[in-house]
Amino acid sequence: MEDENEQTYVKLVSAEGTEIFLEKRIALQVDTMRAMLEGNFRESEESVIRFPDISDSALEKVVRYLHYKDRHANSTVRIPEFPIEPEEALELLVAASFLNC
């Protein structure tokens, strides 16, 4: 039973080594993460994805966005704007481009 629970989350590791856990079903919605988790990569065996070029703050914001996107995926009403501070924009753009999300 524990193995089943371990597989429901993916560990994301930032450039600084911070670990963030993300539900696997949400991670699979991101093209880059899906390729890593479903391909013949170390990440698919370990359920750990390392992002040596994405900072703690950018990775945390990306994970918040993925939860936001998942929560509002089937919304029939106008969804609230996802807040991004101007000083975060460039770093988040680079991360989003890499992740294709």
Image (cartoon, rainbow, N blue to C red):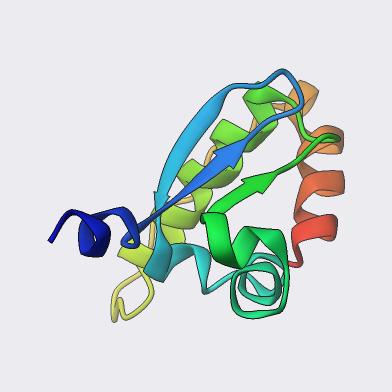
> Relative to 34, is 72 on the left or the right?
left
Q: Residue at x 68, y 32 (%)?
A: 58
Of residues 15 and 39, the one drawn nearer to the viewer in this rendering: 39
Q: Position of residue 84 (x, y in %)?
A: 63, 35
**Would residue 23 be visible to someone looking at this image?**
yes
Q: Quadrant of residue 101?
A: bottom right
Q: Quadrant of residue 73?
A: bottom left
Q: Is residue 81 above or below residue 78?
A: above
Of residues 79 and 8, the one drawn nearer to the viewer in this rendering: 8
Q: Is residue 4 above or below residue 59?
A: below
Q: Is residue 32 above or below residue 55?
A: below
Q: Residue furthest left?
A: 1
Q: Position of residue 91 (x, y in %)?
A: 83, 34
Q: Residue at x 30, y 76 (%)?
A: 75
**Would residue 101 be visible to someone looking at this image?**
no
Q: How many marks?
A: 0
Q: Quadrant of residue 13?
A: top right
> Relative to 81, is 17 on the left or the right?
right
Of residues 15 and 101, the one drawn nearer to the viewer in this rendering: 15
Q: Position of residue 100 (x, y in %)?
A: 76, 67
Q: Position of residue 89 (x, y in %)?
A: 78, 35
Q: Residue at x 57, y 36 (%)?
A: 61
Which corner quadrant holds the N terminus? bottom left
Q: Residue at x 70, y 76 (%)?
A: 35
> Relative to 21, is 44 on the left or the right?
right
